[in-house]
């Protein structure tokens, strides 16, 4: 592995050296002079950031790419064999056999398809709802934002108590007054993922609401007045003024919420543990790589995920631009 | 004559129409406002009730929590106000959560200082200096902002434990270092520093200041808003981080940050719901304080988030 790092480092230094020489030749042609002292201090001041970025940003990405084509296991780090596309073949076999990976894909799809429109729609609604100058509107905003303040870990543990299967759970004790239950919400194959969706949207949408709110203040008032003069009702104003004005904000929120949703893992991890009906792609990848120590296979999952997420985000940006 | 009459009649007719239209319009507005407030209150309750529940249960004994019904679910146990902080006392002294809270604070403080130094210096160099090979670094910054990094948490783990050999207590270094480097912060600093006029540096340079001296004495003091924004988001990030410290510090519970120790508290034999809730409240409190105190910088952060695309 150390050899691999040296090779990567070598390539990096070589690219850097070539660019430095090109810059120096260009400088000579154009009669630009670099101050030697400034150059040295520039490199020295860049060094900590470059070192850390190399170790913790660039290397993990390149390693993840490389591991995907090996049989690397954490228990025997010194005997890594190149296996070509074998990992990917294994993963496709797992999908066609409806194994854990198949469930992980289905659950992640359910989560993304439900949470992205729900969270963004809710956030946009709340932003429009609080976009009035009325006494008390600030209290509403604080209330809607309050779940953002508690972390995902705390949210998961809190809802674990709310959804507890016995009568000490809030929801079951409320249902008990109607003579229903107790229901084990998170053990139910059909509803567990939906509860995680609801909880995540509840926790996150206040954040996007604030982003939408600051986007709304950027839309000029005279556009609304002009629309009123043209006889537009609130729906017409929403379609022809608000939405076009919010386009960059919507694009940003869509991309970030989408990427975040694809990576969902803390909620099922803390609320149900590794279960077929709630396992997600990230959780599967983590379990495979960290707990079972199949780093090669896990990296293959990561590579597929990165390609799929990257492609979809690219399309979102192209379509909405 | 008849014409005048008809026109008069018309006028009163119009006036009547006007008033008869106007009154319902006002009424309509009031009704809309009332609906708006009712909808707002219901929505607010949906968002706040789970949190009120957490706060209420955290002050109750298990018995009181189990017996509460209706509105009492969201209120403290008024019959036993003497034991209001009993769960908190137990979480702090018996379960020692203060140690983990302190760990989190220390990790966050180190991460914030290093984050501003490392990324600030990089942003300073890339915005203010010209040197051969600069294009490569500028390109890398712009490229790496868009790469999803979380998918590489397992390779990062192998690098920290097997290449850097940060095992046992040394793993703490591995917990902090990845949160020190933040490519997006480099980009933020670059953007901000570029807006600082060159005159300031030149004046200092004439006075004999070094490149590093200018960064500390001129650039950083002039960039307080962006430094504060970076610090606030770095704090929230480190304080809320769960998975990464959990991976590295399993077995070293005395070094764990607070989010990772929540799991341990859940699994203690005989832990009450109230104690779990108390630990959750303690974990949320610093972030709550940050949001109240540093609101301005968080909103600023939202604004800069738009730059990401």
Image (tube, grey):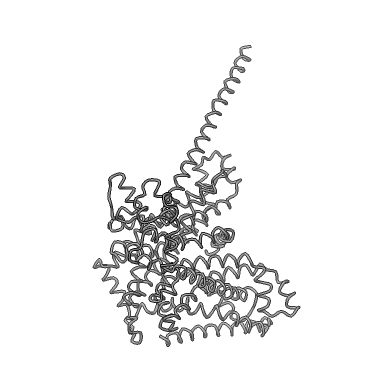
Q: Position of residue A124 (x, y in %)?
A: 48, 51
Taking the view exactly as shown, the residue that stands out farthest to the front is: B82
Q: Is A279 positioned to the left or the right of B82 in the image? A: left
Q: Position of residue A307 (x, y in %)?
A: 40, 69
Q: Residue at x 62, y 74 (%)?
A: B124
Taking the view exactly as shown, the residue that stands out farthest to the top is: B1
Q: Is A108 positioned to the left or the right of B189 in the image? A: left
Taking the view exactly as shown, the residue that stands out farthest to the left is: A97
A123 or A168, nearer to the observer: A168
A51 or A176, nearer to the observer: A176
Q: Residue at x 55, y 51 (%)?
A: A216
| Above or below: residue B266 compared with residue B23 | below
Q: Position of residue B282 (x, y in %)?
A: 46, 62
- Quadrant that contains the N terminus of chain B: top right
The tally of labels here is 0
Q: Residue at x 51, y 38 (%)?
A: B33
A183 or B146, nearer to the observer: A183
A286 or A110, nearer to the observer: A286
């Amino acid at each position: 592995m150390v050899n691999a790092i040296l090779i990567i480092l070598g390539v990096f230094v070589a690219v850097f050296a070539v660019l430095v020489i090109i810059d120096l030749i260009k400088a000579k042609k154009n009669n630009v002079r670099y101050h030697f002292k400034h150059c040295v201090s520039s490199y020295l001041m860049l060094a900590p950031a470059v070192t850390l970025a190399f170790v913790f940003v660039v290397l993990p990405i390149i390693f993840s790419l490389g591991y995907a084509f090996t049989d690397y296991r954490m228990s025997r780090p010194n005997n890594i064999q190149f296996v070509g596309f074998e990992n990917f073949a294994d993963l496709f076999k797992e999908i066609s056999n409806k194994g854990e990976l198949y469930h992980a894909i289905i659950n992640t799809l359910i989560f993304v398809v439900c949470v992205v429109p729900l969270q963004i729609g809710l956030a946009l609604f709340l932003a429009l709802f609080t976009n009035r100058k009325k006494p008390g509107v600030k209290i509403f905003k604080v209330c809607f934002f309050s779940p953002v303040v508690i972390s995902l870990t705390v949210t998961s543990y809190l809802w674990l108590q709310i959804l507890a299967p016995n009568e000490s759970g809030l929801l079951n004790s409320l249902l008990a007054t109607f003579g229903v239950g107790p229901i084990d919400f998170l053990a139910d194959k059909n509803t567990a993922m939906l509860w995680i969706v609801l909880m995540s949207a509840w926790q996150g949408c206040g954040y996007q609401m604030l982003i939408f709110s600051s986007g709304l203040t950027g839309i000029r008032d005279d556009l609304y007045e002009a629309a009123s003069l043209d006889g537009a009702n609130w729906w017409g104003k929403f379609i022809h003024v608000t939405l076009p004005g919010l386009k960059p904000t919507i694009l940003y929120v869509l991309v970030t919420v989408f990427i975040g949703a694809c990576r969902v893992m803390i909620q099922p991890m803390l609320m149900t543990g590794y279960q077929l009906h709630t396992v997600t792609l990230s959780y599967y990848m983590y379990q495979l790589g960290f707990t079972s120590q199949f780093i090669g296979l896990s990296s293959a999952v990561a590579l597929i995920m990165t390609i799929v997420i990257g492609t979809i985000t690219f399309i979102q940006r192209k379509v909405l631009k | 004559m008849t014409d005048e009459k008809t026109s008069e009649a018309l006028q009163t007719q119009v006036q009547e129409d006007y008033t008869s239209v106007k009154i319902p319009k006002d009424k309509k507005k009031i009704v809309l406002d009332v609906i708006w407030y009712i909808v707002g209150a219901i929505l607010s309750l949906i968002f706040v009730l789970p949190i009120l529940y957490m706060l209420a249960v955290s002050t109750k004994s298990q018995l009181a929590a189990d017996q509460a019904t209706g509105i009492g679910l969201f209120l403290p146990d008024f019959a036993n106000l003497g034991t209001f902080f009993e769960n908190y006392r137990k979480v702090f002294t018996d379960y020692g959560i203060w140690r983990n809270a302190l760990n989190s604070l220390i990790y966050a403080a180190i991460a914030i200082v290093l984050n501003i130094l490392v990324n600030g210096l990089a942003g300073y160099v890339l915005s203010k200096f010209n040197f051969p090979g600069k294009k490569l670094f500028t390109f890398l910054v712009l490229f790496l902002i868009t790469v999803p990094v979380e998918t590489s948490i397992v390779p990062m783990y192998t690098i920290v434990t097997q290449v850097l050999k940060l095992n046992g207590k040394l793993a703490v270094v591995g917990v902090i270092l990845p949160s020190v480097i933040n490519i997006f912060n480099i980009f933020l600093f670059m953007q901000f520093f570029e807006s600082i006029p060159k005159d300031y540096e030149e004046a200092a340079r004439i006075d004999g200041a070094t490149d590093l001296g200018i960064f500390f004495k001129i650039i950083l003091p002039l960039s307080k808003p962006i430094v504060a924004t970076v610090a606030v988001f770095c704090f929230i990030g480190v304080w809320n981080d769960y998975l990464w410290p959990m991976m590295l510090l399993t077995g070293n519970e005395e070094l764990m940050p607070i989010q990772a120790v929540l799991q341990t508290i859940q699994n203690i034999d005989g832990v009450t719901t109230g104690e779990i809730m108390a630990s959750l409240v303690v974990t949320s409190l610093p972030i709550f304080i940050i949001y109240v105190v540093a609101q301005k910088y968080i909103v600023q952060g939202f604004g800069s988030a738009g730059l990401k695309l």
